[in-house]
Every structure is written in C-alpha cells, then in structure tokens.
Image: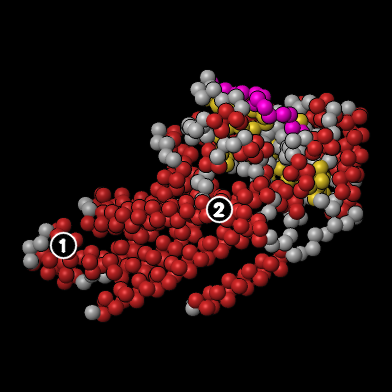
Amino acid sequence: MTIRKFLTMAAGVAALAASVSVMPAAADDSKLEELKAQGFARVAIANEPPFTAVAADGKVSGAAPDVAREVFKRLGVADIVASISEYGAMIPGLQAGRHDVITAGLFMKPERCAAVAYSEPILCDAEAFALKKGNPLGLKSYKDIADNPDAKIGAPGGGTEEKLALEAGVPRDRVIVVPDGQSGLKMLQDGRIDVYSLPVLSINDLVSKANDPGIEVVAPVEGAPVYCDGAAFKKGDEALRDAFDVELAKLKESGEFAKIIEPYGFSAKAAMSTTREKLCAAK
Amino acid sequence: MEWDWNFVWQIMPTLLEGLKITILATALGSVVAAVIGLVFAILRMTAPKPVARATSFIVEFIRGTPLLVQLYFIFYVLPDIGIRLPALTAGVIGLGLHYGTYAAEVYRAGIENVPRGQWEAAKATNLTGRQTWIHVILPQAIPPMIPALANYLIAMFKETPLLSAITVLELMNQAKSVANSSYRYIEPMTLVGVFFLIMSLISVVFLRWLEERYSRLEER
C-alpha cells in the first residue's frame, strides 16, 4: 500500500468519525413512553457493593439499582437491564445513548451536575481509605497523600475518589487507576499502592470480604464531605427525570425507600435531609 | 458533540506524556523480545534434547495464551510468590516474552535458511561452536529476518494499550483518564488513533528502508 493510499484512508476515517460525531441527540418528552413500550430501562452500574453488585449468576442488586428498579416499576417500566461500566465512562455513555440512566453511586459534584440531569439524592456516603495495618504513612486525608512524595493512592477510574485526590494536589503518577475493588485490594496487599480509596460502605464491604488482618480502614477521610448520588439522566431527558423524582419522593415518604437501602447500610435520613440543589451547588 | 480544538491543545501535553511511555514500553519490549527470542531459538535448535523440548513447550505455551492474560499473571499473581514488579517493568517483560516467542520462530527460520555447507565449512576450518555462531551463521541469518522482526515490532507497538489493564499510564490510559474527567471521548480517542497512525507510518517507511537495504545486501 502506498503512503498516499494510506493517507486517503486516514482522511476517510477522520471524515467518518466527524459524521458520527454530529449525530443529533434525540431530546424528546416521550422517553418514558419509549421505555414503557420497550419494557425495560438500560442502567449503568459499576459492581461496587453495596452501591451496585452483580452476583455470580448475573443478577443485579445493590442499593442503587434496587431503588431504580422500584421507581421504574411504579412508572410502568417493568424492569431494568444493567451494564457494567467504569465510572468515567458512565456520563459519556449516557450522552452517547448507550444507557438511559446511571444508577451507580455516581456522587453529585458540580461538574457532574453540569453534564447530566440528576434525580433527587438517593445514596449518601463519606469517603474512606483502606491501608496497611497501623497506617504506616499516617494518611488521614487526600492532602496527606499529596504531601507525602512516597504515598500512592489507588482509586476507580473517573470515580469521585480519583477526582478528590487530584484536586487535593496528588500528582497524576501517584494516583493509580484501579480497574475494580478486588484488584485494588490486591494492589494494596502487594504494596503497589499505599491507600485504596472508596466510599465508606464500599471499603467496609470489600475489607470484610477480604478478611485480611493486615488491612485497616480510615473512615471518614478528613476534609472530604459526605456525598450523595442520584439517578443520572441525560440532559434533555428532564421530563423522565421529573417523573422519576415524583415516584422517588413517594417512595421516600412511604418508608419503603428506607426499607430498600437500609439493609445495605445506607442512611435514608441522610438522603432525605438534603436536596439536589444543595449538593450540586456545594463546592 | 463538536470537535473542540481548544480542548485538543489542553489535553495534548497529557497525551504526549502517555505517548512517551508507549514508545518507551515498545522500545524496551522489543529489546527484551529480540534477546529472549534469540535465546529461545538457539536453545531449541542446539541444546540437549530435554532442554530443547522444555524450551519448545514454553514457547508454544506463551504463543498459545493471550498477552492480556500473561500481563495479569505477571502483575497480579507473581506478587503472591514474592516477585513484585513495577507496572511498567511487568508490562515490558510481558510484551518482551510474548513477542520473544514470535521472534524465536523468525530466528529459527532465518537460521535454518543458512545452507548446510556453511556449518560443514565452519567445522572443517576448526571453528568452535561459539565462533561458528557469531562469525558464520548469525551474520548470514539475521539480515533476511529483519523485515519480519520489524513487522512484529509494529504489532507490539499497537498492542501497548493492553498495558493500561495493569495500570501503566501509557497513551490509551492517559486518554481514558482525560475522558473520565472531561466526559468527552471524541478528541482523546481520535488523537490516540492519530498518534498511533503517525508512529506506524514512520515505522512503515523505516521498514521499507530496511527491506531495501538488506535485500540489496543479499544480492551482493
């Protein structure tokens, strides 16, 4: 193949990419009708118990999908179909129409609020560290990690913890993107990272399953506020989001909300005592 | 979603950091592959039977399993027996071992292509085994291998994004991390493709040059 042919091909590929990129974003109010007719809503999850979990037989559970399943049932959408995704890939996937809603414990932060339409708060949790017994580096906050040139932190890619670490000034090469909880724990045990950071309930779940006396938990992390997630919809699907909010509010009121999330360890009160508006405005 | 040049310039330094690691991993990986491949080939062809057999088995084993599985093994399983390698080292060893087995086959073909008479002549002139290899066989065997080896080099280069699975911050991983915080895939992923294309095109030109140079050498 000649160089020229190569370049023509490259130009063709670029043109194709450009044409794909300008595909119209279908914004319509009939999204709910569409989901009803379809019989299910596609949700993005992360397999991070207790927020989201996939059992060995493929059954999807976890507090976030459970709440979404119940709300969608009340909206007339029979079921949810979940696909596992990296945190960072969830919002782009939502924008690209790969799923209808994110129910994964994707905490509300102003920049995320700007990118998606969140429901009212559902699951709230603080951040935690898992580290070696005795906390040899004395790490209590993301700032501590930034200040110690030897400390390496592991966090899920695109997750809140990765962002918090980077915001606290930890350089990129000391923030290790860990593909999943199990490898995070393994890397901590192997000494590849000094801290593995996840929300408190996730860390507790992971550490109790690992049952390793050499690991200890610092929770909550100093200086990191309690975050809450919500079901995240695509911008333009606000009508669906509003319908979701109405049913969610009813669920909260009837006490069923607490019944769903409290067995997982989440506090219904925490979610009910705050609002999307507050959380999205918080720095 | 629109193409945003400002964003492109903003993420360029991050991606170039990643490109550096990608090139470094490829360069080191190819050195490891070249050396390991040669060792494998020579062991297979000249070592005593049990050793040659064992080498054949290892080569077939490595060639027959996916690189990604090997990388996971080196990175996550080896620490259990006390071998803890930094991510990049683990990646270079994985790439080197994997492509070393391919290189071994290329070497074998090249060495077997040296006419039998050369071996006999070496023996007749009383050269030692070492001298025969270094002064007679390898100088004739290596030039025809170069295009095939260079091909594997390009293949290896394009496989480096697999290293992102073991947390090496190479080009693909940097692009993913950029996309993770910006929620945009179009620019980072396009740039990754463009970087790889540019590097591959340069390699293709280089490969052409090597082919020409060494085919001419053979005619001499």
Q: Which residue carries the number 2 mark?
A: B13
- Spot occupied by residue A50 in the image (x, y as percentages of width and height): 70, 32
Query: In this image, A19 relative to A169: left or right?
Result: right
**Residue in the foreground of this view, choosing between A267 and B14:** B14
Question: Mark 1 or mark 2, which is nearer to you?
Answer: 2
Q: Amino acid at mark 1?
A: Thr
Expressed as whole percent of the image width and height from the top left, the position of residue A178 reads 57, 40
Q: In the displayed image of the protein, which residue is found farthest to the top?
A: A134
The residue that label 1 is drawn on is: B132
Q: Is residue B87 left or right of residue B215?
A: right
Residue A223 sits inside the magenta stretch: yes
- Chain holding disc 2: B
Residue A90 vertical position relative to residue A219 in the rendered view, above or below: below
Q: Residue furthest bottom?
A: B219
Label 1's element? helix
- Is disc 2 surrounded by few (<14), some (14 to 19) or many (20+) residues within 10 Å? few
- The magenta segment is A208-228
Q: Position of residue A141 (x, y in %)?
A: 61, 27
Residue shown at 26% from the left, 54% from the top: B43
Residue drawn at the location 74% of the way across and 60% of the way down: B1
- On the question of residue A143 being in view, the answer is yes
